[in-house]
Amino acid sequence: MTIILTNDDGIDAPGIRALSKALGGEGIIVAPKEPHSGCGHRVTTHKPIHLDKRSLTEYAVDGTPADCTRIAVKHINKETKWVLSGINAGGNLGVDVYISGTVAAVREAAMHGIPGIAISHWIKRPSKINWELASKWTEKVLDFLWDKTLETGSFWNVNLPHLETDSPEPKIIFCEGSTHPLPVNYRVEGDLFYYHGEYAKREHSKGTDIDVCFSGNIAVTLIKL
């Protein structure tokens, strides 16, 4: 089974290495050369995209996450069976899916009839992500999702919680995505606007992905094109 691994934090980010570890080193990494967090589903069509073949199983793309998926499934391996994106350093919950490069990579795969899973890790600042634990949880989630039926044109969006070391093992919970807007707040200095919305204080409805993840469990949401 050929699996493509990508992300929006860049090919050298710790999250994609944690994802690779969760897969036992299987898969082909096709990821952006530089970080593209929050780029949404932007693609490159008006300039060439440089492809750096680092090895037989690792390619750095001078483009966006969606570019990576396109090049991966149309050029690097036309027999791709799955596209996995992550593990993103930061949540991609609720309406984040519209601006997330992590999610865009698997949405692009779904457009080509290839199933995908986007995986992100909420950060409860100022704490740091434990990537070993994130890899362990991701392996658990993947084992759970491989056998689930996924209709063509659909993909999974997974968000891992940020827990204290003595917290109970998180449960995997299927849920709907929140539709509440992100906090939109700015600090204004003259004609300059500095965004400073507080992610952890965003509104959400009970039982939605934000509620599940913020409550200490793994939120799994089915998204359709």
Image: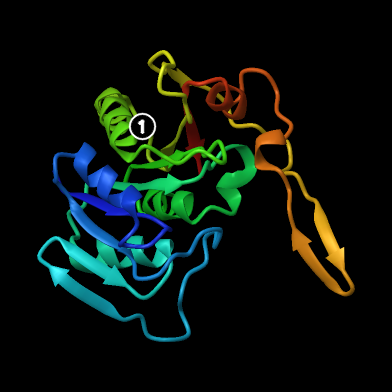
In the rendered view, would you say 183 is above or below 71? above
Residue at mark 1: 150
Nearest the viewer among 132 and 182 is 132
Relative horizontal placement of residue 137, taking residue 55 as reference (left or right)? right
Which residue is pictured at 44% across the width and 16% down the height?
167
Q: Amino acid at mark 1?
A: Leu
Which residue is pictured at 28% across the width and 36% down the height?
132
Relative horizontal placement of residue 86, taking residue 40 as reference (left or right)? left
Which residue is pictured at 40% across the width and 23% down the height?
165
In the rendered view, would you say 147 is above or below 83? above
Residue reaching furthest to the right: 190
Which residue is pictured at 58% across the width and 26% down the height?
214
**Residue 179 in sight:** no
In the rendered view, would you say 201 is above or below 219? below
Residue 61 picture location, percent across and down: 32, 72
Relative horizontal placement of residue 222, taking residue 204 as reference (left or right)? left
Q: Quadrant of the N terminus?
A: top left
Residue 158 picture location, percent across and down: 44, 34
Residue reaching furthest to the left: 56
